[in-house]
Amino acid sequence: MKLIENVIAVEPYPVIYIDDLDLMVASDLHLGFEIVSAEHGVFIPRVQFNRTRKIIEKSAKKSGAGRILLLGDVKHEFSETGYHEYKEVSIMLEYLKRRFREVILVKGNHDTFIVRMTRKYGIEVYDIYNEKGYTFFHGHKDVNISDVKSRVLIMGHEHPSISLFTDIGVREKLKVFLYGEWKGKSVVVLPAVSYFAEGSDVNVLPKEELISPLLRKMDIDKFKVVGILEDDRYLELPEVGKLRKYG
Amino acid sequence: MPIEFIEKPWSEEESLACLDEDIRRWFRNKFKTLTPPQRYSFKLLSEGRNVIITAPTGSGKTFSAFMVILSELFKLSKTKNLENKVYCVYISPLRALDNDIYKNLMIPLSEISREMEDLGEIRIAIRTGDIKPYEKQKQLRKPPHILITTPESLAIILNSRKFIEKLKDVRWVVIDEIHELASSKRGVHLSLTLERLQEMCRERFVRIGLGATLHPIEEIAKFVVGYENGKPRDCAIVDVTWFKPFDLKLICPTDDIIYTDAETLNQLMYKELEEIIEKHHTTLIFTNTRSGTERVVHHLKKSGRFDEDSIAAHHGSLSRDIRWDVENKLKEGKLKAVVSSTSLELGIDIGHIDVVVQIGSPKSVSRCVQRIGRSGHSLEDTAKGILIGMDRDDLIECGVMLKSVMEKRLDEINIPKNCIDVLSQHLVGMALNKKWRVEEAFNLIRRSYCYKDFPYERFVSVLHYLAGHYADLEHQSVYGKIWFDEKEGVFGRRGKYTKVIYYLNTGTIPDEVKVDVYKINPKRYVGDIEEEFLERLRKGDIFVLGGKTYEFRYARGMRCYVEEREEETPTIPAWFSELLPLSYDLAIEIGKFRRRVEERLERGESIDDIVSELPADHRAKKAIKEYFIAQYRYAGIIPTDRKIVIEKTRDLKGRRVIIFHALFGRRVNDALSRLFAIIAGKKYKVDVRITVNDNGFSLMPSKEKDMDIDKLIHEATEVNVRNILKENIRKTELMKRRFRHCAARSFLILKNYKGHKISVRKQQINAEKLIRICESIDPEFPIIEETYREILEDLMDIRKAETVLKNLKDGKLSYEVIETSVPSPFAHNLIVLGEADIVLMKDRRERLMELHERIMKEMV
């Protein structure tokens, strides 16, 4: 599904493919989530790694992407990385390296110490990555927009989702893509690939409660919404502002 | 005979002859006579028999157990045979009770010791979660001869390598307040603890069970003594429940209970209450909820009729110091009135209470007896109880309840069985003790009443779960709590943290996840709500918190933001409130009473004398009478224990509602209502909103449909209830909440790890996702199975629901369908109850597609 010119959401997956760059973008993988949880006493069986690999493999096949960019929070633990998490991230990077012509990594707030892993596979790590009129950043830090020359901004971090209530009062939550215009630029906010990441309900929360400082400045009520239904299709929805009354 | 009822007491002489002579002298000086339980117990215990004693609080039943034990200890001490080890373990559900027992044992001990020279020290000590490490050290060096503890602390002692050595010659285990323990997972947990302790002891110990109201007592006896080789161990039963006389009365605060508004009714109720308090020296008041307790205390203090310091609240949410202070003031006679929800039901020392007042129905005869039994200056004194009925159903319920008390009928305790989560905890504990053969461990747990029929395959699947076999090999070291080799048939300890996990997470009482509530402007903390409550809230909903009404705005993480909205009507009822369900037995008694009334009305006869059987005041009788007559005149029929009435009607907004007048108590109706909602929903392709209370349930289809009740009933009697309910429960919030509790008890989600309390945020894994993951590993994943079992058997009562359906099929229970334009009087409480739960027919995907369609249509 086309979000903006040359930027395609690869249905039904939470990733985009940028035509003119031959680049697939996936954000917020949070690898190692279960292991980190287990180390904190919450013994969630490991399922995320295989799911994530499947999502990347299938969307790569569908889009035919030759390159991939990971848009931050590849791993889950903030502080030092444990053995099992290290291993999980390494195996994923090794797979990506094999699967794609090029792997680019933009750092997120969880990606401390990631260089230890990327160095081994010769993967470049950026805070902000620019290519042919596109700027990619994770979204946890404020960005001085007047410095940005690109026409299109791609970000993650927020894990956007929406909550909808049915007639009988049942709450349903969907991961969503957000996209719209801001200060003459196009903005696309990616949903989290992670199975466990809980999102910000953008149609319920007031703007000042969003976690991304940059997103707080934007008028996201005018942003359009594409929801992901049960991992098998998209739902095209109206703008955030119009969804507020369903939240 | 393994379980034997002891019908005749022994004489005082025979009984006292069982005691050591010095003890006997002391006892004679101190007490005029033996209390009824003592006339049974001295002899039985001196013969070393297992005994269950049921007798009212304050009847000296604890002493009846301890006199013989003290006597034996004195004998050992005199002959210099008293060793440095634990002879007796006393277990109660409350730390406060432990403290009381300690004090009550120290008195005779010091008094007797004073009279005797050359007596070795007899030591008594408390061991609960409160005690300091140095005290534990002391207990290890100089073990108490009598150890006073709680079920949880005893379970931990089992894994204390050094201290357990001191317990290997335990001769007596006393379990107090069994009625409180046996009906919950705490009791299940204790039953396994006792079998593990027995396994470690050199000799078989004597078990002494004490309780105020125990029914059916044979089953509870088996629960206490356990099984050996598939047969219950021997046990003598002493039942003196009823020797204390009761003076009971039901009152109605108004002449006209229908047209008195809630505010006025409350005022009138308070007036009654104030008069009762003034007429008595000390009044104990029970409400059914903690919030009710707070409201009553607030009102009484403000009334100006009493010194503010002479009124106090006592409930579980208050800090230990405050409760302790209240208990002391009570003992000193400094309080005019104390208001409690449940906490004062148990045998904590509270001094003399003249009268017990219960506001609203206590929902079970046994609970009623326990509460009212707290009054009366001495044990021969009459226990005086006043029930205040707050609506017409309440009045009938209370009336029949008091009649049951007079007729000495208690209701049954439900003892949970085969709980996988509790078993998991103990298996981890057992693995820490030593290496086990699977068979050997399986035989041990089957000695517990609660696991005597536990299937072997299930046992093995629990071992697989605990060994982390659901994870791939490489990660089993992270997930496994035990090591299990199925081929060799052995299991044992694993991992350096497992011991700490066991210590810090043992227990069965779930932690509720609390969400902080903040006012937005100015930003201020106003209290907390349960996470499950939050899940039900949407923007604009009004709810009550700490007596104030708030409008919900939004939530972020573990915080919820609200605005204060004065005097707005709440849109969300606290539907999962603390309200107790009506016991099935009492429900049936009420049904029988209704049947007798209907028979009279059908013959055109007066019902005055039947209603007069109820120990109620004039106004209560009048209200009850009018209620029956109104129902009969309007609907021409009264639902009874043998007849369900199904009423097709419309609610105040004109929506179609089908009311099932099925008086079986909420636990049964919860199951029945869901079953009917599912069948109706499938048949007519609608979502159905259900409302449940003790007297019946209602179905409200999302679209107007004319339902064929005969077909619904026929289908309901033909299907596999358990499977259908499981499928339905799977989609509910209830499932998520209970799953999290079971997962915590099974050590899948720890409350405490590596010495740190785990932050709520970390525990905050979405339960729905976790359930789905577990299902994908194994649809019968042990914790999922336990969640279903807990909901169906403990929270609901699926067995009784199945009985009801079977009776419907066999014609033992009939039903009649009526149609009314306005709901009949008996339906009113259900109609005003409002939203309770929703039975979803469509899956998530369908719902979302519909929503999407609607939204897109509105956009055009």
Image (cartoon, rainbow, N blue to C red):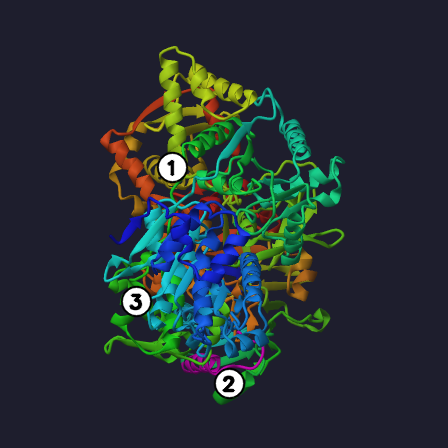
Amino acid under disc 3 = Leu
Q: Quadrant of residue A78?
A: bottom right
Tell which residue pokes out farthest to the top in this image. B604
Amino acid under disc 1 = Asp
Quick check: is B53 in the magenta stretch?
no
Relative placement, left or right, of A33 versus B421 is: right
Residue marked by disc 2:
A117
Helix, strand or loop for the magenta stretch, by majority: helix
Q: Name the element at disc 3.
A: helix
Badge 3 sits on which subunit?
Answer: B
Residue marked by disc 1:
B585
Residue A65 vs residue B6, the one in the foreground = B6
Q: Quadrant of residue B755?
A: bottom right
Task: Answer yes or no: are tags 2 and 3 on the same subunit.
Answer: no
Residue sitting at 52 percent across and 42 percent down?
B379
Distance of label 2 from label 3 (alpha carbons): 50 Å
**Cβ atoms under marks 1 and 3 closer than 8 Å:** no
Q: Name the element at disc 1.
A: helix
Instruction: Give the x, y percent position of residue B214.
Output: 40, 46
Dot 2, how many residues are within 10 Å of its Cα: few (below 14), some (14-19), or many (20+)?
A: some
Picture layout, residue B607 above or below residue B38: above
Residue marked by disc 3:
B444
The dot on residue B608 is none
Residue B708 vs residue B529, the one in the foreground = B529
Instruction: Give the x, y percent position of residue A169.
Output: 51, 43
In the image, which residues are magenta? A76-98
